[in-house]
Image (cartoon, rainbow, N blue to C red):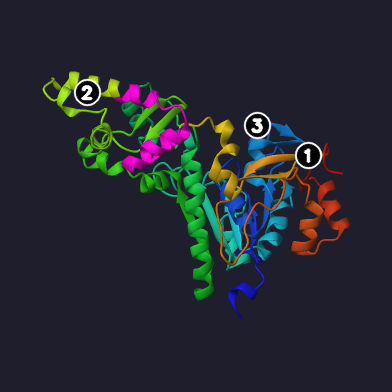
Amino acid sequence: MTSSAVEKDYPLSGLKVLDFSRVLAGPFAGRMLCDLGADVVKVEPPDGDITRLWGANVGGIPGYFSQQNAGKKNICIDLRAEGASELVFELVKQADILIENYRPDVMPRLGLGYESLIKINPKLIMLSISGFGRDGPESHRPAYAPIVHAETGLMARQAKRSDLPYSDLPLSVADTNASLHGLVGLLSAVIYREKSGVGQHIDIAMIDTILVTDDQLHYDIEASEETGPLRNDTWETGMGAILVSADFRWLWKNLVRHFDSFDDSRTKEMALEEKIRVRREQVGSFMISLKTWDEVESVMAKMNIAWGKVRDPRTMRDQETVVSRGSITDIDDRVGGLRPIPQSPYRFSNANSGVQGFAKHRGEDNFSVLSTWIGNSNEETQALLDAGILCRDEEYVD
């Protein structure tokens, strides 16, 4: 049978995931697993994920929470309640993967550490994400992405290169890096389990994931920053700002080579600072004279130099590739309309992927998950609610 005749499925269809994580380092990994077809159940505490307070609230679901938890089922368990650990054990018996990002001492203190869980399910793969790892002198420290950005030198480098005061990055790189490396670890462990039959505990430290993906770090730890390329330049055109993927020396050489209006001889004998100033003024005047994006594209194509518009992120839905690839899609907003959400980036030739639906309210799937995962009757699940082991958002969940 040819591949074109095979009905497409999701790559991770059939994989069962318990997602105990919150905010971003962990929930993002769970969202990607869900988009790839895994049955992901978010296990939320009674007071909810803090991100339920962030972003536009539509139908009781704020935007930040929606983006990281779309498509997941949701149950709400008070892990401190008597009998809660027994319920978690029953769920773990059925799980392939468990994700958590508490401080390293929290899950063991609740009786839900890896050593306890593998006695129940020896094939369980558990991903633990923390700022500084599960062992070592700083394992006890709480950490969010900005803490790791500071500790890994990203903030200092940004301040040095921009000549601005220290400030955090405009996105949570440490969190998303931890999630993505967690995904690599999880899927590697799934393949290893197929060969060995055993589960795995994966220890991801956010500090490690920043260092290993920091392509600029070698300049710092080998004290060789002066050997690096000059910064890419931004220029104002008649249509708006662009970033040019070339340092000024390379840009100038190409402009002289391809455009008669640029002449080296006029500035060749000038002192260096004056030469740079005059040349930059000439380039600036040339760039601002470009009055259409077609003109900008033509100039850059002639020099074979990559460039990009400096965009307001609020306009991303209009970006040509984003439109073509469906990189931002729409999901049901649960109040009769649609809301935008970034689509996962995986495009398979012979498999499906993509966001699986809207994010859920706390405890919205208590009954259905406990029925399908562990065979609970409605009466048994209601008893867990009455006992305070399970919770739900009464405003939105009947």
Single out the residue that lies furthest toward the left.
269
- Residue 68's place in the image compared with 9, above or below, is above
- Tell me which amino acid carries mark 1: Gly
At 38% across and 47% down in the image, what residue appears?
A: 213
Q: Tag on residue 337?
A: 1
* Viewer-side residue, 39 vs 284: 284
Residue 125 appears in which quarter of the rendering? bottom right
Q: Is residue 209 magenta?
A: no
* Viewer-side residue, 42 vs 340: 340
- Residue 339's place in the image compared with 123, above or below, is above
| Label 1–label 2 contact, CB within 8 A | no
Residue 59 x, y percent position in the rendering: 78, 36
- Tell me which amino acid carries mark 2: Ile
Query: Which of disc 2 and disc 1 is earlier in sequence?
Result: 2
The residues colored magenta run 283-309
- Is residue 320 in view? yes
Give the residue number, with chain letter if any, for mark 2: 276
Magenta span dominant secondary structure: helix
Disc 1 packing (10 Å; few <14; some 14–19; many ≥20): few
Q: Mark 1 vs mark 2: give the one in front.
A: 2
- Image quadrant containing the C terminus: top right
- Tell me which amino acid carries mark 3: Gly
Looking at the image, residue 43 sits to the left or right of residue 3; the answer is right
Give the residue number, with chain letter if any, for mark 3: 55
Secondary structure at numbered mark 2: helix
Q: CA distance from mark 1 to mark 2?
A: 55 Å
Q: CA distance from mark 3 to mark 1?
A: 17 Å
Disc 2 packing (10 Å; few <14; some 14–19; many ≥20): some
| Label 3–label 2 contact, CB within 8 A | no
Q: CA distance from mark 3 to mark 2?
A: 45 Å
Residue 199 appears in which quarter of the rendering? bottom right
Secondary structure at numbered mark 1: loop
